[in-house]
Image: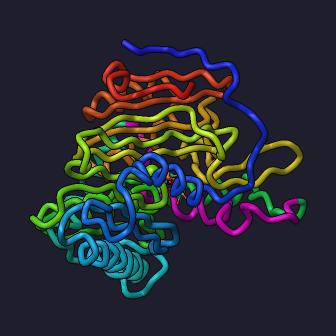
Amino acid sequence: MVGRIKNSCIFGCQSRVKLAWIWLLVVLICCGCGDYGINGNEKEPARRIDTAMGTVISQTLYGEGKEEASVGVLQEITALEQNVLSWRLDTSRIYEINVNAKKGQGSMISPDMEEILQECLQVSEASRGAFDITIGEVVRLWDIDTWAGRADTENYPIPTQDDLQKALYNSGYEKIKLQDNILSMPQNLQLDLGAVGKGIALDRVRAYLQEREDISGGVISVGGSILTHGKKQSSETWKVAIVNPRDTSAYLGYLALNGGWCVSTSGDYERYVEVDGIRYHHIIDPATGYPAQSGVKSVTVLSESGLLSDALSTACLILGEEKGMTLAEQFGAEALFVDEAGEITMTDGMKAYFHLSK
Ligand code: ADP
Ligand code: MG
């Protein structure tokens, strides 16, 4: 059912280079920079790099409307963050839902929001709670986003067992109730869509691009989660690189894809703090309250759904290869795991797309 490729030399020196920029470089390389003559050539794609959702957004778009569409894509992503997904911005729907819950009130939700939450809950159930959008309080205790990349990690305040247990006690996706367009949850429960935000953004971008007949194809990266859309000018496939989790300036191989795919990667190398040789990373196992330790260094998930590729990559990193593989297959997704020894394991379906770097 699964394939294993022995790869003995992928773990090299660690790089401190910011991951999102590495991804960006990789996407640019893999989109075939230089394929198409000089700027101004109508076959030349529009390329754009921006920041939104706290990460790097890169776009390569082909078609007559490429310049205008690239502005539209950025607007879609920014609006999604500001109006819907952010747990930080008081303009967003998630923020409002969390505030209402604190006041002991339910919230009316739109059909779009209901669909997003239902899909998240499905992944939670299927992963037996490994994926859980109510784990935010525990994530905040670890506060990896603040400490990742800092020099003074000897001062990093590792959360106490006691605090973690209390925060875990308050969490739990099964406490979310969705009925008749009303979401209700206990006062101390808070939603955090951080593990699926980029994937949801890809779904939005795809819907936007599909509406535009003046766009023939493109690749959009939202912080390393990637959407392939339509066709490349040449009849080649899109190539999406998979980063080496131990040397993020190198990549293990690439996926050769037609349009219509979303690729998300979760890894313990993305955001972490190292103290006394122990790595505390940003993906938390709700079963323990501690960063996941499944023996997996990174998981890449391929799905037609951005939300699913993102949710499943997070869940699979927590569950490890065997259970993760089963989970991905349950959702019709493909997955590729890199373990601590650098060994690559993937679903059968993934083999049709993956090419190992030489
Ligand atoms: P990245 O954002 O680096 O691509 P992920 O998509 O895997 O990585 O999402 C990680 C984020 O998801 C964390 O920063 C945190 O906000 C949130 N998170 C951490 N653990 C879980 C979990 N078990 N279930 C759902 N969300 C989680
Ligand atoms: Mg994710």
Q: Residue 163, percent across and down?
A: 69, 60
Q: Residue 284, percent across and down?
A: 58, 49
Is 201 positioned to the left or the right of 49 in the image? left
| Magenta stretch: includes residue 152 | yes
Foreground: 49 or 277? 49
Q: Residue at x 45, y 35 (%)?
A: 254
| Magenta stretch: includes residue 219 | no
Screen quadrant of the N terminus: top left
Q: Measured along the vertical axis of the image, is residue 208 above or below residue 271? A: below
Q: Residue at x 58, y 44 (%)?
A: 267
Q: Residue 28, percent across and down?
A: 47, 54
The region drawn magenta spans 127-153
Foreground: 180 or 229? 229
Q: Measured along the vertical axis of the image, is residue 101 above or below residue 91? A: above
Is 151 positioned to the left or the right of 43 in the image? right
Screen quadrant of the C terminus: top right
Can residue 93 be seen in this snapshot? no
Is 278 positioned to the left or the right of 164 in the image? right
